[in-house]
Amino acid sequence: MTAQFTGQQPKERVAPPGQGFDAMGKPVPYERRARAYKHCKEMGLTDHDHIMSVVEGMSNALERDEPYRAMSEGMRHLDLTGTYRLMAVLLTDADEDTQ
């Protein structure tokens, strides 16, 4: 398949091992949880208990490979977009450029 209008082959994006969907069912490292906590604050959550509840609830569900449960944990204090953003933070490592 070629990219429309360019005639070039599209670049395939592949998540590194242990990231993205491959990270489900595996432990969520502390670094990802810490970034998720910071990300919640950037999205407007201010209550420490609410933030910890969301981060831990989503992390525990993702470690058990239960993405729908993780979504419902996130929706307790975040909107849908915020929940997806937080899930992405919990499932991926930080880029070197953004640290």
Image: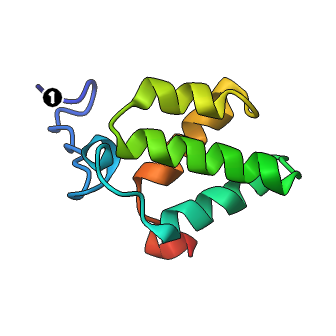
| Amino acid type for the residue under numbered disc 1 | Thr
- Which of the pair 82/53 is nearer the observer? 53
Q: Residues within 10 Å of mark 1 (few under 14, many from 20)?
A: few
Residue 36, compared with residue 98, is above or below; it is above
Count of labels in the image? 1
Give the image's coloring scheme. rainbow
Viewed as shown, does residue 79 lie left or right of 60? right
Residue plotted at (61% across, 32% down): 73
Give the labeled residue for mark 1: 2
Residue 80 placement: quadrant: top right
Residue 54 position within the rendered picture, expressed as x and y whole percent measured from the top left: 66, 43
Residue plotted at (41% across, 58% down): 28
Residue 67 position within the rendered picture, expressed as x and y whole percent measured from the top left: 42, 30
Residue 73, compared with residue 31, is above or below; it is above
Viewed as shown, does residue 77 lie left or right of 18? right
Residue plotted at (88% across, 52% down): 46
Residue plotted at (29% across, 52% down): 26
The residue lying furthest to the right in this view is 46
